Amino acid sequence: MRRHYLDHASTSPLRPEAAAAIREWLDAPAGDPGRVHHEGRQVREAIEIAREQVAALLGVRPLQVVFTSGATEAVHAAVWAATWDRPGAAVLCAGVEHSSVRASSGRLAPLVELPVDGVGRIDPDGVDAALERSGGAVSLVHCQWANHEVGTVQPVAEVVERCRRAGVLVHADAAAACGHLELDLDHGPDFVSVSAHKLGGPSGIGALVLRRGLRAEPLFVGGQQERARRAGLENVCGIVGFGAAAGALADGALGDEAGAARAETAGVAQAVLAVPGTVQVGDPDDRVPHIVCFGVEGVEAEPVLLGLDRAGIAVHSGSACASEALEPSPVLEAMGADPNHSLRVSVGWSTTDDDVRAFAAAFERVVAELRALRA
C-alpha cells in the first residue's frame, strides 16, 4: 500500500538537493573551519555559501544568520539574550506560541499572557495595552510569524512597530513560515528563529536571524564560532544541507510551491467541509499555504488518526494522544477550540494530487464508520 504523507508541518521529507549536497560533503576531506590551512578554508567556504543561500531565502545579509542546532535552540538563544540584557523584566507571550517559546521564557522571566482572537491571532492593541500596564519593565515580546497548528499568519510588522516605539525587543518564531511564505526580515523583528527540517532540509540544524546591528549575549560560550555568537564546532553537514534546501527555493520556486500548496490545502478543506459536522479552525484565508486545521464533531482525534493511518495517510492532531505530549494542544485551547477533536493536514514540496485525493476518500469513510460505531 502506498503511503500518503500529509504531516509536513511536523517535519518535511529531505529534498533531493539537500540529500545530494550532504552526500557530496560526506566524501569531502575533514577540516576545522576555524583553521587557516587548505582543509579548513574549504570547510569555511562551504559554510559561508550555505549562509548566503539561507540569507537570500530570508531577505537578510549573511552576517545576520547564526546557525544553531534547530529552531528550539534559536528560540532559547533569543530569550537568553533579551532577558540577559534586562534581567527581571517580563516577557509578553500569547498562548498560541510554540511550547519552546513559552517554556524557555517562563524559566527566565515573568510571563505575561497576550490574548488572541478566535482564529489565534494576536491583537496589536493588546500588545500596546500590555506594554503600558508593565510600565516599561518588558524585556521581550514574542510574535510568531505563523501558527504551527492552524496556520494563521500574525501581524508581525504591526507588533514590531509598536514595540520599537516602546524600546522593547521582538522575537518571531518563523519555523512554520520559512520556506512557505516570502519573508523579508531585513527590517523585521530583532530575533527570528527558523528550522531547516520544516522546509525539506535536514533535521538538527536551524538559525537565529539577528536584526542588523544588534549585539546579543550568546547562549553558548567557550569558542569563537559563528563570529563568537554561538560556540561549538559547526554542524557542517547540516549547514550544507540547509543551504541546499534554501537554494532550491530560489528563482521563484518558493512562490510556485506556495501556489501549489494553497491549491492542495484548498482541496483538503473542500473534502473535509463536505462532511457534516466539520469546521475549519484558524483563519481560512490569511494563513500559511501548507497548513489547514479542522474540528470534527462526534468523534475524537485518536480513532480518526488511526483510521487514516490504516488507510496509508499520515496527518496530525492537537490531542495529547497524537504525540508525545502529556497535555492537549495549548494553542487550540487558547483559541477556544477543542484539541481532542482536531485534525491538522499539512502539505509540502513532495505532495501530489494523488495524496489529496487519497485523503479525501479515506477521511469521509473513516469519519462515517466511527460515527456509526458511536451511534
Image (cartoon, rainbow, N blue to C red):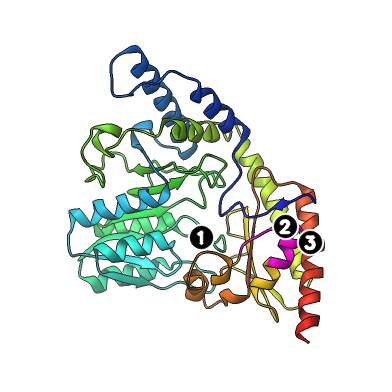
Q: Secondary structure at mark 3?
A: helix
Location of residue 9 (image quadrant): bottom right
Amino acid found under the numbered disc labelled 1: Asn
How crowded pointer 2 is (Cα within 10 Å; few <14, some 14-19, many 20+) is rated as: many
Q: Is residue 319 visible?
A: no
What residue is drawn where x is 43% and y is 68%?
123
Q: Earlier in the sequence, mark 2 or mark 3?
A: 2
Residue 147 numbered mark, or none? 1
Q: Secondary structure at mark 2?
A: strand
Q: Secondary structure at mark 1?
A: loop
Amino acid found under the numbered disc labelled 3: Ala
Q: Earlier in the sequence, mark 1 or mark 2?
A: 1
**Magenta residues (range):** 306-316
Location of residue 24 (image quadrant): top right
What residue is drawn where x is 77% and y is 66%?
363
Q: Earlier in the sequence, mark 1 or mark 3?
A: 1
Q: In whole angstroms, how far apart are the C-alphas of marks 1 and 2?
A: 23 Å
What residue is drawn where x is 58% and y is 32%?
19
How crowded pointer 3 is (Cα within 10 Å; few <14, some 14-19, many 20+) is rated as: some
In the rendered structure, the answer to whether residue 205 lies left or right of residue 135 reads: right
Q: In whole angstroms, how far apart are the C-alphas of marks 1 and 3?
A: 24 Å
In the rendered structure, the answer to whether residue 322 lies left or right of residue 217 reads: right
Residue 315 magenta-drawn?
A: yes
Q: Is residue 255 visible?
A: yes
Q: Position of residue 43 (x, y in %)?
A: 39, 22
Residue 313 numbered mark, or none? 2
**Residue under label 3:** 360
Q: Position of residue 357 (x, y in %)?
A: 80, 55
